[in-house]
């Protein structure tokens, strides 16, 4: 009886697949979407940033001809997370360029597109020029609320040189 109880206890405390993500402060839904990233909830109001207990500063960034408020948060594991808020004070994007950060499958800023495609085989690559201003873009949609920005310099000529520049976590699937 003691042996069975010990075995059951060992199974109960043995880290499962989600242990890797919790070590990086990711909390995922059943569909693979992230709800909290390095201690920052994806559904966050600007008014609730202070209650996180994490150092932050307020700022703003341009978006389609307007300024949106942001909170630049020193999140867990020394990951710098930028939260972008809409005009109602609700978060619309949680993003990082920190090399310490990982996405749910282990992708880091600086990883190659080849690595991303191996870790997210069901994902889709989108690239081209924006309608406004003709800026080049390259994004990788994972099918969850995690999206990746990529370098655009070699996208057509040599995809092996394309790198992840930013990890986004949105309130919707990409």
Image: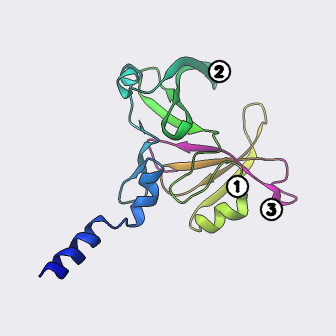
- Label of residue 84 in the image: none
Residue highlighted by disc 3: 160
Circles 1 and 3: CB distance less than 8 Å? no
Residue 46 in picture, x, y percent from top left: 41, 22
Magenta region: which residues?
A: 153-174
Nearer to the camera, 13 or 89: 13
Q: Nearer the viewer, mark 1 or mark 2?
A: 1
Residue highlighted by disc 2: 65
Residue 144 in picture, x, y percent from top left: 48, 54
Quadrant location of residue 8? bottom left
Instruction: Give the vertical position of 148 relative to 123 (above or below).
Output: above
Q: Is residue 152 left or right of residue 23?
A: right
Residue located at (48% from left, 50% from top): 24
How dense is the environment of label 2, judged by Cα within 10 Å: few (below 14), some, or many (20 and up)? few
Residue 42 in picture, x, y percent from top left: 42, 38
Say which element carries label 1. Answer: loop
Say which element carries label 2. Answer: loop
Whether the magenta-drawn stretch holds residue 5 is answered as no
Circles 1 and 2: CB distance less than 8 Å? no
Say which element carries label 3. Answer: helix
Q: Which corner quadrant holds the N terminus?
A: bottom left
Nearer to the camera, 1 or 12: 1
Quadrant location of residue 159? bottom right
Whether the magenta-drawn stretch holds residue 166 is answered as yes
Residue located at (52% from left, 30% from top): 74
Instruction: Give the vertical position of 44 relative to 141 (above or below).
Output: above
């Amino acid at each position: 009886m003691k042996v069975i109880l010990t075995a059951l206890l060992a199974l109960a405390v043995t880290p499962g697949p989600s242990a890797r993500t919790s070590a990086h402060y990711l909390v995922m839904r059943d569909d693979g979407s992230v709800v909290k990233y390095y201690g920052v909830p994806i559904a966050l109001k600007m008014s609730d940033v202070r209650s996180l207990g994490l150092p932050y500063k307020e700022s703003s960034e341009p978006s389609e001809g307007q300024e949106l408020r942001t909170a630049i948060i020193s999140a867990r594991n020394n990951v710098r997370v930028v939260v972008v808020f809409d005009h109602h004070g609700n978060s619309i994007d949680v993003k990082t360029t920190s090399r310490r950060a990982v996405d749910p499958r282990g992708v880091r800023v600086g990883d190659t597109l080849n690595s991303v495609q191996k870790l997210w085989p069901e994902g889709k690559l989108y690239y081209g020029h924006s309608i406004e201003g003709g800026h080049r873009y390259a994004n990788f949609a994972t099918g969850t609320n995690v999206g990746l920005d990529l370098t655009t310099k070699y996208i057509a000529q040599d995809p092996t040189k394309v790198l992840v520049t930013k990890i986004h976590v949105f309130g919707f699937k990409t």
